[in-house]
Amino acid sequence: MAESYSKIGFKQQVEKNYKTNFYANVFDGSFFAFGKGFVSLSTILPLFVHQLTSSKFLVSMITAILMFASNLPQLFSARIIEGLEHKKKAVLLLGLLQRLPWLLLAILTYLLPHSQWLLVIFFFCWGLYSLGSGLVVPAWFDLLSKVIPVERRGKFFGYRTTLSSILKLIAASIAGYIISYFNFPFNFTILFSLMFISTMISYICLTLIKEPDYPIANESKSFVDYFKNLPKLITKNINFRNYLLSVFLIQFIGMAKGLFTVAGIERLALEGETASQVVGIFTVLLIASQTVTNILWGHISDKYGHKIVILFAAIFNATGVLIALFANNVIAFYLVFIFTGIALGGNRVSFMTIIPEFCSAEERPTYIGITNTIKGITMTCVSMLGGLLVDLLNYKVVFGITFIMISLGSLILFYQVQDPRFEIE
């Protein structure tokens, strides 16, 4: 009776603070995305590293470090997070690890512009940021799942992702101006500083979240018992296990996605300013198609569940890869990036949001950690494999394998995974 009463009290707290928490979370994500627009993983950071070294391997390490450091530690942090009654403190503490490295990097880039240590400093700061981004996810998503009811999360992610995409596009445009107008290293000092300022604004939004007291606390386990229990957890939940298998196969999009731009430039024989202009259009189409579909995906997921959104996102990804397999003109490559952007929007809304629906509230951090660890390992390995296969063979082999794997994953998702929201009902 007491437990039932406490659950009623929890729901009342959620409803009472819903508007505050909704907007605090939306603006947290939007300002964080605004900051990331100044330090794009695809363009700005590779250019910074290229200014310091001619090594292509070190440029590729930017993505490798992010994928490893932001995904693999999540199972370790999830074990600790599960035992915490309140998640907000952990989010705020780990959130500083995401933000402070940018301040350090901005200062040292200005003070040590031509030092051989600047490259080491960059990768140290980037590693800290990536690690913080990984460790905070289970706590952050568990906090979000507490304050945003399940039937409204699709709408929430739709609005959050749309505003984030708009601000990120604005930031990327400003970054392009700063890079061309100011000389090295002052241009990057400005960009790193803007990243720090924007993410600190998002941090202030995080402090405004009002976390309710959840009536059930998960029992604390030792690390040995915790990791021993993981295989049992996956085995007993057949629906979640099938979902993980479909995720593993669908994530093969990582084998091809990073090669679309280079494939387009080479097949269309683009050079110099023309290549830059076309790549700019690719970028705009990718972000714009994601932006205009985010709210639609959010409403679909609220009404019909997240499974259908993830399924359609996989179909759009597979279609984009299939077009890329045969593309030999610029319009075809425009379609590749449009379909990829639409798929990216759907995954942003539903890929993470569906996970809490597979499990109890106490198990959320572990389920999130398992999913993102598998995603991280898959994306890291297939990205490197894709580049290797292109060097040894050609783009068609890579795009063909990617299309087959995504198609298999989509079939498993369609036939073997029940939408957990309706399965529970």
Image (spheres, rainbow, N blue to C red):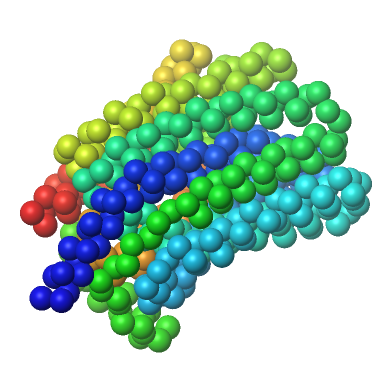
422 to 159, vertically: above or below: below
Q: Position of residue 163 (x, y in %)?
A: 45, 32
* Residue beneath the point at 73% across and 23% down: 177
282 to 404, vertically: above or below: above
Asked if residue 247 shows in the view, the reply is no
Residue 35 or 420: which is nearer the viewer? 35
Residue 412 or 198: which is nearer the viewer? 198
- In the shown orientation, is residue 162 left or right of residue 39? left
Q: Position of residue 387 (x, y in %)?
A: 56, 43
Residue 223 or 264: which is nearer the viewer? 223
87 to 153, vertically: above or below: below
| Residue farthest toward the left in the current orientation of the protein | 425
Q: Quadrant of the N terminus?
A: bottom left
Residue 255 or 12: which is nearer the viewer? 12
Q: Quadrant of the C terminus?
A: bottom left
* Residue beneath the point at 59% across and 45% down: 201
Asked if residue 303 shows in the view, the reply is yes
Q: Position of residue 256 (x, y in %)?
A: 47, 38
Quadrant assignment, res 181: top right
* Residue beneath the point at 25% across and 73% down: 216
- In the shown orientation, is residue 331 left or right of residue 43? left
Q: Position of residue 335 (x, y in %)?
A: 42, 19
* Residue beneath the point at 72% across and 43% down: 192
